[in-house]
């Protein structure tokens, strides 16, 4: 299964390292990534492969959300099919 990870918050050193490290420790592979800084705000979208994930989707989602809160970021994970359905015109 593939999923979309979004990260938004104030820019600071180490955001990509922390998020990608958390995904790696859970067995999630990053397939594509785009990020930008708009003034002082960091935004990132990742397409990830969850097939090797060692955690349940809801568990990983909750852990990333909690990590984001500790870092002052909003981190969300959505299944790719749900993301596409929500953004279909």
Image: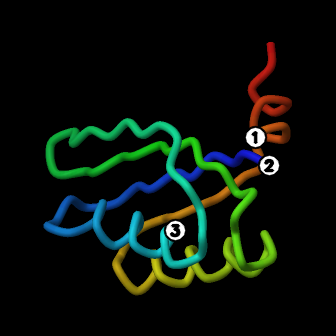
- Residue corresponding to mark 2: 1
Secondary structure state at the residue bearing disc 2: loop
> Which residue occupies the foreground of this view, 10 or 67?
67
Which of the 4 image quarters holds residue 28? bottom right
Q: Callout 2 environment at 10 Å: few (<14), some (14 to 19), or many (20+)?
A: few
Alpha-carbon distance for marks 1 and 2?
Answer: 8 Å
Above or below, 30 against 81 in this view is: below
Residue 60 locus on image (x, y percent): 67, 75
Alpha-carbon distance for marks 1 and 3?
Answer: 16 Å
- Drawn side of residue 60 relative to residue 38, left or right: right
Q: Residue at x 72, y 45 (%)?
A: 2
Q: Callout 3 environment at 10 Å: few (<14), some (14 to 19), or many (20+)?
A: some
Residue contact at pointers 1 and 3, CB within 8 angstroms? no
Which of the 4 image quarters holds residue 68? bottom left
Instruction: Check the picture and name the quadrant holding the C terminus.
Output: top right
> Which residue occupies the foreground of this view, 32 or 84?
32
On residue 35, which mark appears?
A: none
**Along the polypeptide, which appears first: circle 1 or circle 2?**
2
Residue 16 locus on image (x, y percent): 30, 60
Camera-side mark, 1 or 3: 3
- Drawn side of residue 84 relative to residue 43, left or right: right
Q: Callout 1 environment at 10 Å: few (<14), some (14 to 19), or many (20+)?
A: some
- Residue corresponding to mark 3: 23
């Amino acid at each position: 299964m593939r999923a979309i990870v979004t990260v938004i918050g104030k820019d600071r050193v180490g955001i990509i390292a922390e998020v990608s490290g958390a995904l790696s420790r859970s067995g999630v592979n990053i397939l594509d990534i785009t990020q930008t800084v708009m003034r002082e705000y960091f935004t990132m979208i990742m397409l990830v492969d969850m097939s090797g994930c060692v955690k349940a989707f809801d568990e990983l989602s909750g852990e990333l959300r909690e990590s984001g809160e500790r870092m002052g970021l909003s981190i969300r994970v959505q299944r790719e099919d749900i993301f596409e359905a929500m953004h279909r015109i």
